[in-house]
Image (cartoon, coloured by chain):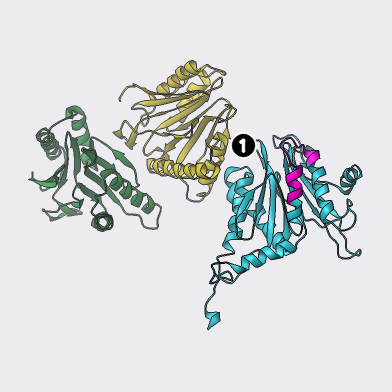
Amino acid sequence: MADRYSFSLTTFSPSGKLVQIEYALNAIKQGVTVIGIKSANGVVLATEKKASSNLLKTENTSKIELITPDIGMTYSGMGPDFRVLVDKARKLAHTNYKRIYNEYPPVKIMVQEIAKVMQESTQSGGIRPFGVSLLVGGYDAHSDRFQLYQVDPSGSYFPWKATAIGKTSVSAKTFLEKRWNENLELEDAIHVSLLALKESVDGELTGDNLDIVVVSDPQEHLLGFKGTSVEGPRFKKLSSEEINDRLDSL
Amino acid sequence: MSDPFSLNGGSAVAMVGKDCVAIASDLRLGNQSLGLSNNFEKIFQFGDKTFLGLTGLATDVITLSEVFRFKHNLYKLREERDIEPKTLANLVSSTLYEKRFGPYFVSPLVAGLDPKSNVPFICGFDSIGCIDFAKDFIVGGTASDQLYGLCESLYEPSLEPEDLFETISQVLLNAVDRDALSGWGAVVYIVTKDKIIRRVLKTRQD
Amino acid sequence: MDVILGLRVADATIIATSKAATRGITVLKSSDDKTRVLNPHNLIAYTGEAGDTVNFAEYIQANIQLYSMRENDIELSPKATASFIRNQLATSIRSRKPYQVNVLLGGYDVASNTPTLNWIDYLGTQVELPYAAHGYAAFYCTSLFDRHYKKGMTVDEGLELLKMSLKELEIRMPLDFKGYYVKIIDKDGVRDAGSL
């Protein structure tokens, strides 16, 4: 009888809660900490890239992904769910925006599209919510500002100046509250993100076990072609050397 | 004879001046040789400084003006800002190409100033959305041949708004006088960074 | 080859339609009314493909009446009605079998106290006009209207002008239209002004 109905896994409990979403949030709270910091001239996304064995190749695994040339996204929670959302987000950026207006979506619109996907998974039959919280950072050409958003499994989203999600998010946020101010430069933001990560990572921080992405100035050398009016991508992943340089001066 | 583009008649032209653009159209709507209306506008405004001219089959002119009003309203709600001329141009292009194998029989024009930088922008399209980016002028409608001729002889770059008004008006008026399907009144829009001037021209009614 | 004419005067819209229903060279009926009342202040007059015309007009009529039933007896304005009809025809023209119907919509807007006349063809072309006609009659009548129409004419003056046009049609056209029905739409609604 039960299989005749395709109820959403997230039906309301008698107390009015959607317990599946609470469980998802709990899963995220166990996840690896991710830091996002906005500054006047760029936004930083930083996280630990943990390897469970030294036999694992970590140099080509990536936890922060490019969605559009000016927008990056990372997560805390379930890795496979994140991959699905990355694929969907990249596709939506084109079908719902670039193929219509011939330009990439602003950060807010991209976030709304992703949030819509996540919300729909809390109201559809036979599927579970996404087990991730996202940090989406990017550049908005129309306001000439950088933006940072968090998106939760429920589909709710929040704009932040700086935030953290995952295992040590509470203490990391307290730390960021103390260290963030309006005059922060991009390099300061990278510095603060490393300090914040240091608290949550057991063991030494190295360029190999960290993933750091900045969205800041256009990177013409990453474009791959020349002679057009197309700007280079603002999304740039720091190499392990670049991370080590900054760790040295910590 | 039964070419949908010349069933109802009508023409439009857009030009770039110094820190300004102009777009103008006639006001005729007819059924083949029979004139029906001398008050059929073919230019539509989107936001403060962006205009869309639609010539061709009148039913499609009405349909598309409504389609783009709808899409523009949604755009404003989503983005909380006015649409840029080049974004509207790409929206027009993708909307027309969506009907690649059953097109709208129109030749649209876009003219406007960028909402922030006030840089002039004009362009035209074929009926399936191929964009013709032009630096100087763009024409459309049943008098397009005549409009090309007059633009080539009267247009000069970097005209001040009032001079641009004179040029575009003379171009339109003299072009439609040599086209039986265009004329019956005209309307001209001059778009500058701080104001829009709309003038309805008195023209011969034959 | 039906005749449908419309004329907007100061406080009313007048519609005239020929009474002959023909098929080829045969007159089938000489008392055919080519109009439908949509609501108290809207009248549609139609010409076109035989089966399509009545079917389309009655479909419009049903929908306009349905609107009033749903919306607590509010009448759909002439402007909205014209828009609705245009939309149906504009959708139909890109369908597998389009309606081949041309219409005139005579209306009186109760909210702004203005009479209106809308010309709509089978493609979905819609214009608000002071006077209009479909078919061959348009060629003869519009030129007469161009010459004699004046802003702010009374209903009687309008009827005079209409008679003039219908007389011209009798002289210039090779057919007997078996007379005309004349309808007036004003603040009091749609009324029959007899036949000419």
Quadrant of the drawing holding the C terminus of chain C: top left
Q: What segment is highlighted magenta in the picture?
A: A173-188
Residue B175 is situated, as x and y percent measured from the top left of the image, at: 42, 24
Is residue B1 among the parts visible in the rendering? no
Vertical placement of B145 versus A250: above or below? above
Taking depth in this image into account, of A201 and B41 the one nearest to the observer is A201
Report crowding for label 1: few under 14, some 14 to 19, many 20 or more residues within 10 A (C-alpha): few
Q: What residue sits 21% from the left and 31% below the top? A: C143
Q: Chain C drawn in what color?
A: green
* Horizontal and vertical percent position of residue C181: 12, 47
Residue A136 vs A84, above or below: the answer is: above
Q: Chain ID for label 1?
A: A
Tell me the residue that label 1 is attached to: A142
Principal secondary structure, stretch drawn in magenta: helix
Q: Helix, strand or loop at disc 1?
A: loop
Q: Is residue A191 magenta?
A: no
Query: Is C38 on the left or on the right of A44, as rendered?
Result: left
Image-based side of C153 in relation to B142, left or right: left
Q: Colour of chain A?
A: cyan
Q: Nearer the viewer, residue A183 or A227?
A: A183
Note the chain letter of the yellow one. Answer: B
Quarter assignment of residue B181: top left
Residue C47 in the image: state x and y as whole percent.
23, 49
Residue C86 position, x and y percent, is: 33, 47
- Depth order, front residue of A184/B126: A184
Q: Is residue C132 above or below residue A77?
A: above
Which three-letter amino acid code belongs to the residue tagged 1?
Answer: His
Number of callouts: 1
Q: Is residue B62 above or below residue A86?
A: above
Residue A38 visible in rendering: yes
Residue A186 lies in the magenta stretch: yes
Residue B61 as seen in the image, left or right of residue C55: right
